[in-house]
Image (spheres, rainbow, N blue to C red):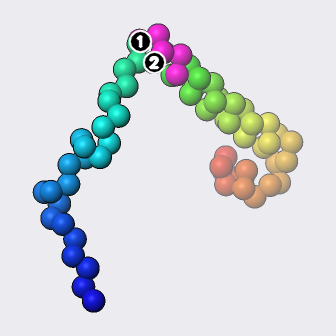
Amino acid sequence: MSSEHPPAAQFDAGKKFNQGAVSLSAQDRLRFAKQALCVLALICIGAFIGYARFPDNSALIAIFG
């Protein structure tokens, strides 16, 4: 029972995923970057607050230790 796979050269990703390109303006890219940085900042602040409230937590000690 051998299954036959077509050679990789016969696969055309352009036909399979023909959705078109997505273009973003500079303002949209800047807005996305600000949102991503805000989420990262909130995660960091949450870790700091967690360490301040629970200084004996071994997971938080591993982050800051």
Q: Secondary structure at mark 2?
A: helix
The furthest residue to the bottom: 1
The label on residue 29 is 2
What residue appears at the point 67 percent right and 54 percent down from the top-left corner? 62
Image vertical order of residue 31 relative to residue 20, above or below: above
Whether residue 26 sits left or right of residue 7 in the image: it is: right
Q: Residue at x 15, y 64 (%)?
A: 7
Q: Which residue is mark 1?
A: 26
For the residues labelled 2 and 1, say whether their Cβ atoms are less than 8 Å apart: yes
Residues drawn in magenta? 26-32
Q: Which mark is residue 17?
A: none
- Check residue 62 for magenta coloring: no
Residue in the foreground of this view, choosing between 24 and 11: 11
- Three-letter code, disc 2: Arg
Q: Residue at x 27, y 89 (%)?
A: 1
Instruction: Looking at the picture, tell me which residue is in the foreground, 46 or 29.
Output: 29
Q: Nearer the viewer, residue 14 or 25?
A: 14
Front residue of 62/39: it is 39
**Magenta span: chief secondary structure:** helix
At mark 1, the secondary structure is helix
Q: Position of residue 14 (x, y in %)?
A: 24, 41
Rendered image quadrant of residue 34: top right
Among all residues in the image, which is located at the extreme right?
53
On the image, the x and y values in percent for residue 57 come to 80, 55
Q: Is residue 8 left or right of residue 52?
A: left
Q: Amino acid at mark 1?
A: Ala
